[in-house]
Amino acid sequence: MNAMNRTIYSILAAAATILGVASCKPDTYSLPDGTLHGKLICPDGSTLITEQPNGFRIRLNEIVDGSISTLPQDFWGKADGTFNNTRIFKGNYIVQPIEGAFLTVDPVEVEIGSDTEIDFYVTPLCTINADISNSGADLIARYRIEKDPSAGKIIRARVLVSKWNPNVGMNHMDYENVRELSAIDDATVQKTTYTDSILDILEAGVTYYVRIAALCENNSGRYNLSEVVKLEM
């Protein structure tokens, strides 16, 4: 089966699963039984923290008879910077992480078999050092942003707060504070320790999860994230 037929087959198979369509005739094609998994690793050895859902994608272009397919097969990575796809046709592929809050990663050729692992080393667009605390019912966030020299302009920072949900992020929050930084030059931003407060939100007996998100200009609009801080009131 050539690359185009495989791609079309994968799309149709997925659609059939979603819609519950069953064929009356036996399928003569082999099912995809290859697996690719791994993680995105930062320069300090930690795994890249990403947005969720849809923080980054892994792009596959199959190599067939020495030619690289022009029909990419993409799948989403996870919030913790890992990825896993168990429905790939075995074969040789060009593999590349894309559309994340990191600098462009060089593609690599990978032979995908029944259990193939590959890690990618990535450079985040920016990193965030955060100190989260409270003063009574007020939440106080102090943070600094450092960007890679090749990253785009620092646009904004957001303090994100969630009640009970440790998966706090742009799509999972109860409170936020937004600081616009696009009018301030990056050198000044990086030299500044910012303090943002969200007043009178913390309730006794509630567990809160807090993190800082920072946006450097990029085509996918992806934010870099700090570690989650847990506050038990």
Image (spheres, rainbow, N blue to C red):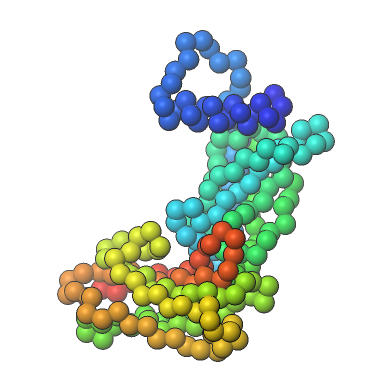
**Residue at (45%, 82%) from the top-left corner?**
143
Q: Furthest residue to the front? A: 183
The residue lying at 30 percent from left, 79 percent from top is 198
Q: Which residue shows up at 23% across the image and 75% down it?
A: 201
x, y (%) of residue 54? 49, 53
- Whether residue 222 sits left or right of residue 71 in the image: it is left
Q: State which quarter of the image contains the C terminus.
A: bottom left
* Residue 38 sits above or below residue 12 on the image: below
- Viewer-closest of 121 and 215: 215
Residue 123 in sight in this render: yes
Residue 123 point in image, percent of width and height = 63, 67
Q: Residue furthest top?
A: 25
Location of the N terminus (image quadrant): top right
Q: Where on the picture, by quarter, is residue 19?
A: top left
Give 111 or 27, whichever is nearer the viewer. Answer: 27
> Above or below — where is 14 with respect to 50?
above
Depth order, front residue of 181/48: 181
Which residue is painted at 63% across and 53% down in the image? Answer: 97
